[in-house]
Image (cartoon, helix red, strand yellow):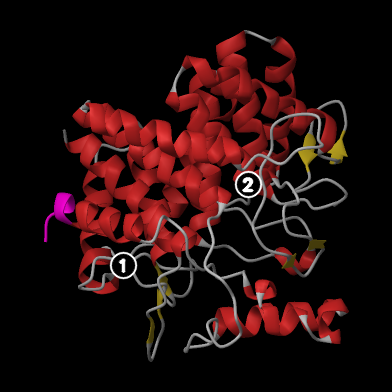
Amino acid sequence: MNFQSAYDELFSWCQQRDFAGHDPFDALNSRVFQSTPLAKSRNARFIWTQLLKRSPSDFRTLARVPPERNAKGIALFALAQIANHRRVKTDESEKQVREFVAGLLSMKIEGYSGACWGYNFDWQSRKFFAPRDTPTIVPTAFAARALIEAGRDLHDTARSVCDFIIRDLPRTVDNNAELCFSYAPKSDTRIFNASLLAAEVLASVGKLTGEQKLFELAEKAVRYVVNNQRPDGSWFYGADPNQSWIDNFHTAYILFSLKRIVEVSSFGSEFQPALERGYQFWKNNFFLAEGWPKYYHDDPYPADTHAAASAIVTFLECVALDSNAATLAQKVAAWTIQNLRDSRGFFYYQKRRFYTVRKPYMRWTQAWMLYALARLLEEQH
């Protein structure tokens, strides 16, 4: 199957469902669970979330978890349609961009210093509990990326995102040389990719507005992440002892954001060597010869569509670093279509060692894969 057919069939499958669906982390939307006293227990919330996420069978219908739209998913769908419109430039593609951007803007969370977005479910992590519609930097940064790419008339909203980052996100590290933005208001995380996503927004908007303050904050946030790069070029997920794993897609997030910051900033040359070291570690440790995207640097399982899609996007973002990057993106895409795609057009969640989880998560797999295929087609155009 060619990439255009895979894109068209996936878009049609998502459109038929109004781009709404389930998510690996939406277990706490269960009306059954919420009706029990367990909903008030931190440990029970975490276990329930992990149980539904890791189960080889899907119990969400039985647990009465409704399919819903997700703000980050809509941001990814918007990015996919923006890439598609840059390629085909039709009235219909322009209309699709406008519709997704309008949907994204309608999902903004009110009551904060600037524009921000969150997830459509309560989320219990190891570190903190984020109630539904708590704004977090990851969906907010992807929304900002879509707004910046969509056009000048949306840049004021993108600038407003900077106010949320500057005023509402705690800084868990903040000194003369470095800073680290937390994941969400009232949290104290030190997650490298999340803080760098905030820096990407600040630098990208700074490029548009010329505000030196935004560049200064972005530079300090980048320096914190680069100073935590390991000697082999890798990054742990976060700074805490229980966050010392290295995975494919969070590394890809760091590389993508770092590449964009280096590209738009006068201070970028300082961090170019770190970008190159990180890219080489990622390229050399996360992919098998046939294009299989390993989840961890030291273990191929599970093969995850999210990891595959973010890898495709990141390879295409890094073509200036590596003349072979576009070919690698195509190889990962071809492997994913061959091994993780359903004949009905959607993509599976994960291929594990002894079985495949065929659940079609809308944000985690479908939105990411549509974005990846759109960027791949754009690059080939």
- Name, please, the residue furthest toward the top: 210
Residue ID for mark 2: 138
Magenta stretch in the rendered image:
1-5
Report how far apart the C-alphas of labels 1 and 2 lie in the structure.
26 Å
Q: Quadrant of residue 274?
A: top right
Report the mark closest to the observer, 1 or 2: 2
Residue ID for mark 1: 292
Quarter occupied by the N terminus: bottom left
Q: Looking at the image, can residue 173 be seen?
A: yes
Work out whether 144 lies above or below 350: above
**x and y percent of residue 123 in the render?**
72, 65
Quarter occupied by the C terminus: top left
Q: Looking at the image, can residue 319 be seen?
A: no
Nearest the viewer among 301 and 40 is 40
Binning the other alpha carbons within 10 Å of mark 2 as few (below 14), some (14 to 19) or many (20 upward) gives many
Question: In the rendered structure, does residue 185 fall within the stretch colored magenta?
Answer: no
Nearest the viewer among 66 and 291 is 66
Q: Which residue does the image show at 74% across and 24% down from the upper left?
A: 217
